[in-house]
Image (cartoon, helix red, strand yellow):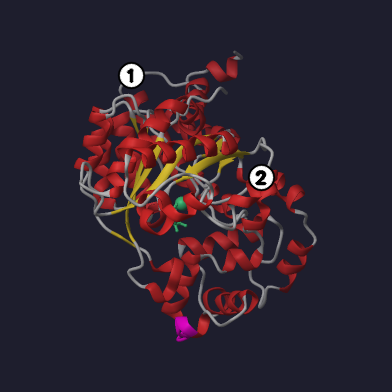
Amino acid sequence: MNQLVEERLSKQNLLSVVEEELSATQIIDIHTHLFKPSLGAVGLWGIDELVTYHYLEAELFRSNDITPEKYWTLTKREQADLIWKTLFVDNPPVSEATRGVIAVLQALDLPTDSADLSEARKFFASQTLEGHIPKVFRLAGISEAVMTNDPLDPAEAPLWKNSAPHKLFHGVIRLDRVLEKWPEHWQKLQAEGYRVEQNLTPPTIAEVRRFLADWCKVMQPVYMAVSLTDDFRYPEDSIRATLLRETVLPACREFNIPLSLMIGVRRQVNPAIRLAGDGVGKADLRALENLCREFPHNRFLVSLLSRENQHELTVYARKFANMMPFGCWWFLNNPSIVEEMTRERIEMLGMSFIPQHSDARVLEQVIYKWRNTRRTMAPILANSYALLVEDGRPVTRAHIRQDLDRLFRKNFQKFCGLSN
Ligand code: RAT
Ligand code: ZN
């Protein structure tokens, strides 16, 4: 190790060294809605998708009198033009989601204050997806992105037939349809040749296991995942709990992968605004406690949507090493809340958690989401080291590098049983 890396840092140097090291860290983005190029038909990218992101659609209706009903009759391009005019021209784009679009435009050397989107559209029309992805990942400082793959999505599932592994993307089996909407989906499994019925009989359980095993072979998932509502309970007398206990958790053990639980959504509190219409509710974390205790041979990645649940989750992480808290999810991914959650996690867990994921739905969003995460987290990390130095323990660049590698790569790789 060279002298510079070993040098004990003074308190004044900590922030700049953390910033430098954080910008050099190649992050694994552990939860996104991005897709590898061979699944490109379901992947979103480009200016019209960026501007019509559902986070921005939710903001549109607060600053423009258009009704949701009228908005949904517009073409994607017309929707983007309306949002651009409303949230970027007539109003200052200071919210987290609007500012993100500005940061992406700047990173791609496109105008940030133009009256319309014509120049940006011209730029994106001249890109190929294969060439654009590595450039975007480079600008975002990420080495890999973890996808969200729903084997029951009629648009996505058939694309897996001709899809080879890709070194920048990892697969994840997303189970919302199986676990949360079994009555509407069991016939889909039946149509695919699995001998299931609506009742969870022993043969049906065995066939759901076979379905999961088959998709594990196809998708090579790094984990399985489900998003759960704020009223999630475990144990409970329900289809969801039975499928979890009898099919999903055994499959995770068999394939030695974690289950990711994202808990706290309140679906469609305002259905008129569609994807933007989900809300948040505080969850009862006894469900999580029961799962972590009753299934010590399973591992759980956990992200919760309610700010009010975060301290409790951090306490649970101190009780259960088979649980890994991750990310500041969705409505929490704002600097004020990221700061609070990250400080709390470092204070109670040291470096044994996964600070963030991007949840990017549109490819170029990884640029701004990771830029914001780095910007918010650098002072928090620097402050933790400053306190340590103050209390008598020297800190070097090598220590910082190792910690960042652990937070943004190794904790995930180890928890998922991936080799690095
Ligand atoms: O953040 C989002 O875009 C949400 O709509 C959800 O996709 C959420 O992240 C999820 O994975 O369910
Ligand atoms: Zn998501």
Amino acid beneath label 1? Gly
Q: Which mark is residue 161?
A: 2
Residue 316 included in the magenta stretch of the image: no
On the image, the x and y values in percent for residue 323 come to 33, 32
Q: Secondary structure at mark 2?
A: helix
Viewer-nearest residue: 138 or 392: 138
Q: Nearer the N terminus, badge 1 or badge 2?
A: 2
Q: Is 118 on the left or on the right of 14, as rendered?
A: right
Q: Is 382 on the left or on the right of 122, as rendered?
A: left
Could you tell me which quadrant the C terminus lies in? Answer: top right
The furthest residue to the right: 126
Answer above or below: position of 101 versus 246. Answer: below
| Residue at the spot 71% in from the left edge and 63% down from the top edge | 110
**Residue 94 in sight:** no
Amino acid beneath label 2? Lys
Q: Residues within 10 Å of mark 1 (few under 14, many from 20)?
A: few
On the image, the x and y values in percent for residue 7 come to 52, 18
Ligand 1 closer than 8 Å to label 1 CB: no
Segment colored magenta: 64-69
Q: Which mark is residue 392?
A: 1
Q: Residues within 10 Å of mark 2 (few under 14, many from 20)?
A: few
Q: Is 196 on the left or on the right of 106, as rendered?
A: left
On the image, the x and y values in percent for residue 202 come to 33, 38
Magenta span: chief secondary structure? loop
On the image, the x and y values in percent for residue 61 come to 44, 78
Closer to the eye: label 1 or 2: 2
